[in-house]
Image: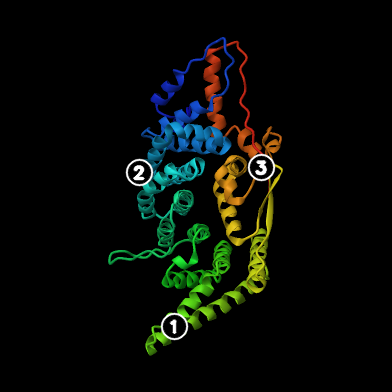
Amino acid sequence: MLDSDDDNSSVSSSSTMRSDRMSVSASEEVEFNKDSLLDEAVDALYEKRGSTREKALAVIIEAFNSNLQQGQQFVERKFATLLHQCLNSIKKGSSKEISLASHTIGLLALTVGPGDNAREILEESMIPLSQAFKSGSDPSKTASLLECMAVITFVGGNDPEDTEKSMQIIWQVVHPKLGSNVVAVKPSAAVITAVVSAWSFLLTTMDGWRLSPKLWQESITYLSSLLDKDDRSVRIAAGEALAVIFEMGSLEKFAAETKGSSDGSVSEGNKSKEGFSYIQGLKGKILNKVRDLSVEAGGKGSAKKDLNNQRNLFKDVLEFLEDCYSPNTSMKIGGDLLQTSSWSQLIQLNFLRCFLAGGFTKHMQENEFLQDIFGFTPNKRNLLGSEHMSNGEKRMYKSPNSALNKARTQLLNKQRMLSAGRNFGHYAVNVGDEDS
């Protein structure tokens, strides 16, 4: 399935032999069988060569993104095998393989939806993911691990304790618990952005009262400091996180709790007053900084798109802080409108849209779990035909470099050799369009 003319990218002979053993009746019209590709890809995860496993994971990701129903049917047969092979890749693979395996596990959770399987994914993955954070510092790998932990917790977490545990692990990527032999490593802007995004994504599912005052003070102080960072993506992620905190009323809750936490002693009373004054001062500082960022002028070398994204975000944050107006957004999914009316919904939508990338439209049209999350009901007529495919999706599926296309071409070539002279059926992918 994954063979190519390039020796460096070919799979071992065992995978080739499995493909060659496929036979098709000469009297039947043969359709491209995506299940066969997925079976071959899972088998390839047992291969010793890392590049082979990476290609197999890429095929699985692309297949899960392009046909949710078929992915659901596949995991009914191979759920445990796929999960544990992906966890093996996280334990022993290269940074690229770890990134692909992490993404696959996140897709697996979204595909199976809430339930026993999603719970198993969360329980089995926590230790391998936590350990993988400590091995190497590749930003792309770390970001994939963070996204994976956030997604599997979002789907498989049954109670607030699960979510809080994951949030603490995510937070420790930028605030590690240092031992006597541990040296603090300054995280990159990409890692900080990924941490804050994953943390705030899970925060949207929490009741702010559950988090301790100490954790609130630490997180709010840190997030407010990020508004002064040079990297624009860091500032945007911090602004979104603070918006969620304000929307939950958590800052006010924390300030009120701090103010009323005195047991009557003079020392405790002074501490409470100091804590309350600190939070109130921090709120004023955040408001002033948000106001500045909403009108920031572009500097030398500043990307106009990034600058506009920052201005628009902080204008929305400022309007919310001053007038309590939440941003109302809408986007087209295959001809249907998906709307959000709160910061929490917007953060969830943006995070999942980024994670699913090319598979976002398909999942929103067919994934009942995501439809329930956003209250989205697609019109069935918009799910028919490939005429709704976006330009990006057309490029993905038509490209000869597509992992799925390469595998499809090789399988069809083998089928043609076995059934020469026959007319073969063709496989078409049906997806909807997405207009941002």
What's the CA distance linking mark 2 and mark 1?
49 Å
For mark 1, give the secondary structure: helix
Q: Earlier in the sequence, mark 2 or mark 3?
A: 2
Q: Position of residue 182 (x, y in %)?
A: 31, 64
Q: In this view, does 118 lie above or below 142?
A: above
Is residue 137 placed above or below 385 in the rendered structure? below
The quadrant where residue 42 appears: top left
Q: How crowded is mark 2: few (under 14 residues within 10 Å), some or many (20 or more)?
A: few
Label 3: which secondary element:
loop
For marks 2 and 3, give the one nearer the viewer: 3
Q: For this rendering, which residue is in front, 392 or 301?
A: 392
Q: Is residue 188 toward the left or the right of residue 350 in the image?
A: left
Which residue of the protein is positioned furthest toward the bottom in this rendering? 266
Residue at which label 1 appears: 272
Q: State how far apart marks 3 and 1 are (Cα).
A: 51 Å
| Residue 32 locus on image (x, y percent) | 56, 23
SS at mark 2 in the image: helix
Identify which residue is drawn at 36% across, 49% down. 128
Residue under label 2: 92
Q: In this view, does 131 lie to the left or right of 171?
A: left
Tell me which amino acid carries mark 3: Pro
The label on residue 378 is 3
Residue 5 visible in rendering: no
Label pair 2/1, CB-CB below 8 angstroms: no
Residue type (three-letter) at the residue carrying disc 1: Ser
State which tag comes first along the sequence, 2 or 1. 2
Q: Which of 270 and 297 is in front in this view?
A: 270
Q: What residue type is labelled 2?
A: Lys
Query: Residue 81: image x %, image y %?
Result: 39, 35
Q: Any mark on residue 261, and which?
A: none
The residue lying at 43 percent from left, 55 percent from top is 159
Residue drawn 55% across and 37% down? 68
